[in-house]
C-alpha cells in the first residue's frame, strides 16, 4: 500500500514539474521592421501583436533596423503597443542602426526599451507635427497632449521622461550609450543581439497598460518569428519612396518604348503594371500630393517625346519634373527618414538624360 502511495506522489510531482516547465518555457513572438514604419509595416506589427496576444506569449519583440517612419502611422502603432495585454519589447539594432523618429516613439511606448551598442534613436525635429491651419492655442494643446503621453509612458516604466518630452516638443537624438547613462536611464537594456537581450530580460516584471504586472520568462522560451507574407513584403518595399520613384521612372521608359513602337505590347503592359505599383507605393508612403502631380507630369512628357518632334525638349522637361517631384516628395516633419535616395536621382538623370 505504501508503495502505491509513493508511486502516486511521484506521479503528481512529475506532472506538476512538467506543467511548471511548460509554463516557464512559453513563447516569445518576434517581428522585424526592416523597411521603416510605413503603413504596411505597421499592419504587420499589429498582426504580430494580435497573434502574440492570442497565444498569451511571454512577450512580443519588435526589432527596428530602419529609422524611416510615417508619423501618422507610427503614433497609433505606439499607442497600440503601450496598451497591449502582453509585454512589448522594442529593440533597435544591430549596431549602426539609426532608429529615427519611429524608433524613438516605439521605445517610449514599449514596456521594455532596448538598443544595441552603437545605435541611436530620435530626430532633430519634433515627434509631433501640427497643422498650421490650427490656431496657436490649439497647436500648443496638441503638442502638450502628445508630450504628456510620452512622458506618462516613460514614467510608468521608470525611465527618463525629460528626454521624451524634449523629443516630442523640439526633437532630440540620443545614442544607446547616452540613453543608458542618463539619470534615470532613457531605456532599460543595452544588448548586442537577440540572444543577449532575451537572457537579460529573464525575470523582469513589467506593468501592462491595464495596470496589471507580469513577469517575463525568456530562458528556454521558443521564439516564433512572424514573417511577412509575400504581399506584405512587396507592399513594404513599394511604400519606400525610392522604390516607388524608380517604378515610376521605369514605367515612363516602358510606356515611351511602347508608344515609339506600337504593337510590341510587352513594354506597354509592363509600364502600366509599374505605374500602378508606383502610385500604390506613393499612396502608402503618404507623400505630398503636389509632388505626385509633378512626377506624373514628368511621366507624361517623357512618354510624349517619341510622338512629338521636340528634339529632346519634352524629355528634358519631363526629367526636370521627375527630379523636382522626387526632391519635394517627402515632408521631413511628417515622414522623417523616407526621402528618395540621392543615388536614385543621379541614376535617373544619367539613364533618362543619356
Image (tube, rainbow, N blue to C red):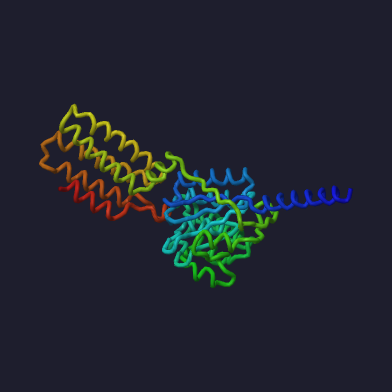
Relative to 226, 202 lies left or right: right
Q: Quadrant of residue 238?
A: top left
Q: Nearer the viewer, residue 19 or 258?
A: 19
Q: Position of residue 92 (x, y in %)?
A: 48, 59
Question: In the image as oriented, which residue stretches furthest toward the top?
Answer: 263
Q: Position of residue 108 (x, y in %)?
A: 55, 59
In percent of width and height, residue 176 lies at 49, 67
Q: Where on the picture, by quarter, is residue 281?
A: top left
Image location (x, y in percent) of residue 150: 57, 58
Q: Residue at x 65, y 58 (%)?
A: 206
Q: Going by the picture, which residue comes out furthest to the right? A: 1
Task: Choose between 233 and 18: the one closer to the eye.
Answer: 18
- Residue 125 in sight here: no
Residue toward you, 72 or 262? 262
Query: Taking 49 as reference, is 96 left or right?
Result: left
Task: Identify which residue, 228 or 247, lies in the foreground.
Answer: 228
Residue 243 in view (yes/no): yes
| Residue found at x 48% / y 53% | 130
Whether residue 66 is situated above or below residue 287 in the rendered picture = below
Residue 142, picture quadrant: bottom right
Q: Residue at x 88, y 51 (%)?
A: 2
The number of callouts visible is 0
At 75% from the left and 51% from the top, the residue drawn is 16
Q: Is residue 303 above or below residue 115?
A: above
For this view, does 291 lie left or right of residue 103? left
Amino acid at each position: 500500500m505504501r508503495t502505491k502511495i509513493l508511486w502516486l506522489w511521484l506521479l503528481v510531482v512529475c506532472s506538476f514539474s512538467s506543467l511548471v516547465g511548460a509554463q516557464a518555457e512559453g513563447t516569445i513572438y518576434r517581428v522585424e521592421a526592416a523597411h521603416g514604419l510605413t503603413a504596411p509595416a505597421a499592419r504587420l506589427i499589429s498582426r504580430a501583436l494580435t497573434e502574440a496576444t492570442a497565444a498569451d506569449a511571454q512577450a512580443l519583440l519588435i526589432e527596428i533596423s530602419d529609422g524611416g517612419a510615417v508619423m501618422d502611422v507610427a503614433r497609433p502603432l505606439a499607442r497600440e503597443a503601450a496598451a497591449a495585454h502582453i509585454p512589448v519589447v522594442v529593440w533597435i539594432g544591430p549596431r549602426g542602426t539609426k532608429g529615427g523618429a519611429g524608433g524613438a516613439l516605439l521605445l517610449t511606448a514599449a514596456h521594455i526599451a532596448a538598443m544595441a551598442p552603437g545605435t541611436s534613436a530620435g530626430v532633430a525635429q519634433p515627434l509631433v507635427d501640427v497643422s498650421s491651419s490650427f490656431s496657436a492655442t490649439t497647436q500648443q494643446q496638441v503638442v502638450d497632449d502628445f508630450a504628456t503621453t510620452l512622458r506618462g509612458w516613460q514614467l510608468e516604466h521608470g525611465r527618463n521622461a525629460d528626454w521624451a518630452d524634449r523629443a516630442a516638443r523640439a526633437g532630440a537624438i540620443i545614442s544607446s550609450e547616452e540613453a543608458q547613462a542618463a539619470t534615470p536611464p532613457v531605456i532599460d537594456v543595452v544588448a548586442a543581439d537577440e540572444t543577449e537581450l532575451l537572457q537579460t530580460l529573464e525575470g523582469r516584471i513589467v506593468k501592462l497598460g491595464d495596470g496589471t504586472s507580469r513577469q517575463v520568462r525568456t530562458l528556454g522560451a521558443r521564439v516564433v518569428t512572424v514573417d511577412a507574407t509575400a504581399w506584405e513584403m512587396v507592399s513594404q518595399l513599394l511604400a519606400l519612396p525610392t522604390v516607388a520613384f524608380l517604378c515610376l521612372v521605369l514605367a515612363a521608359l516602358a510606356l515611351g518604348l511602347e508608344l515609339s513602337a506600337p504593337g510590341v505590347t510587352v513594354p506597354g503592359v509592363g509600364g502600366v503594371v509599374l505605374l500602378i505599383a508606383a502610385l500604390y507605393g506613393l499612396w502608402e508612403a503618404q507623400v505630398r500630393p503636389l509632388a505626385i502631380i509633378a512626377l506624373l507630369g514628368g511621366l507624361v512628357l517623357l512618354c510624349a517625346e517619341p510622338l512629338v518632334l521636340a528634339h529632346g525638349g519634352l524629355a528634358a522637361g519631363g526629367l526636370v519634373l521627375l527630379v523636382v517631384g522626387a526632391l519635394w516628395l517627402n515632408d521631413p516633419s511628417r515622414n522623417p527618414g523616407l526621402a528618395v535616395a540621392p543615388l536614385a536621382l543621379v541614376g535617373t538623370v544619367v539613364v533618362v538624360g543619356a
